[in-house]
Amino acid sequence: MPRSPTSIDRMPAGLSRRLMLGGVALASLLALGACGTPAPPATFDLSAPRDGLVRGRGVGTMVVMEPVALQAYDDDKIVVRGANGALSILGGAQWADRLPKLIQVRIVQTFENAARFKQVGYPSDRLNPTYTLVSEIRRFEVEQASREAVVELSVKFVRSGSGDIAGGRIFSARAPVASIDGPGAAVALQAALGDVLRQIAAFKG
């Protein structure tokens, strides 16, 4: 039995050929687009230490402000310092939130875990604080030359009534980096931050 002509068979030969070629080109573009889609960056979090803390008696209250930071650290990107001192962003990795916000939350949680104050919270909690903790992120990065994670925070405890500084210092720590990639950087920076947070929670002024 003779084959029934399809709609393409009934088209003029030139038009049919152009449609077929156009379909091949479109399929090729779609395939290239799928292959060229970059994978989403891996997301890493930071945590507050629970062990190795100097525990207190739960006296007074404290509000923790969000740390101030230069633009390089005021982001959710992981920063790498090259051998020449230039700062760059580690590709394929990011923090779970802006770094200052993450560190603020982990400072609060560290003091809660250490029970140094009766209450610890944020400015939005409407506490009547004895102290306000203000801080600055000096460094939070991976050094290529030393293959170390470096964390440096400047912290001040301010008396809420008078505005006087009850105490403060620069806290710093380093930790070796197994590999300069997302997982390696996140593990090392977490270790260095944990050390710094323990120092801050134990500080007597």
Image (cartoon, grey):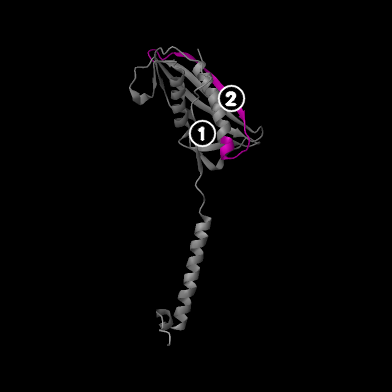
Secondary structure beneath label 2:
strand
Q: Tell whether 130 sits left or right of 31.
A: left
**Residue at position x 34%, y 17% from top?**
128
Q: Which mark is residue 173?
A: 2
Q: Nearer the viewer, residue 142 or 5?
A: 5
Q: Is residue 8 above or below residue 107?
A: below
**Residue at position x 51%, y 33% from top?**
73
First along the sequence among labels 1 and 2: 1
Q: Nearer the viewer, residue 172 or 179?
A: 179
Residue range highlighted in magenta: 160-185
Q: Is residue 15 above or below residue 58?
A: below
Q: Is residue 23 above or below residue 114?
A: below
Assess whether residue 157 is covered by the magenta stretch.
Answer: no
Residue type at mark 2: give it: Ala
Locate residue 158: give its quadrant: top left
Q: Looking at the picture, how far across and down is residue 49, in whole percent?
A: 50, 24
Q: Looking at the picture, how far across and down is residue 104, in whole percent?
A: 45, 27
**Residue at position x 37%, y 17% from top?**
129
Which mark is in front, 1 or 2? 2
Assess whether residue 161 is covered by the magenta stretch.
Answer: yes
Q: Looking at the picture, how far across and down is residue 91, in whole percent?
A: 56, 43
Q: Which mark is residue 14?
A: none
Secondary structure beneath label 1:
loop
Residue type at mark 1: give it: Tyr
**Which residue has dot 1 on it?**
73
Real-space CA distance between mark 1 and mark 2, rounded to the nearest whole angstrom: 17 Å
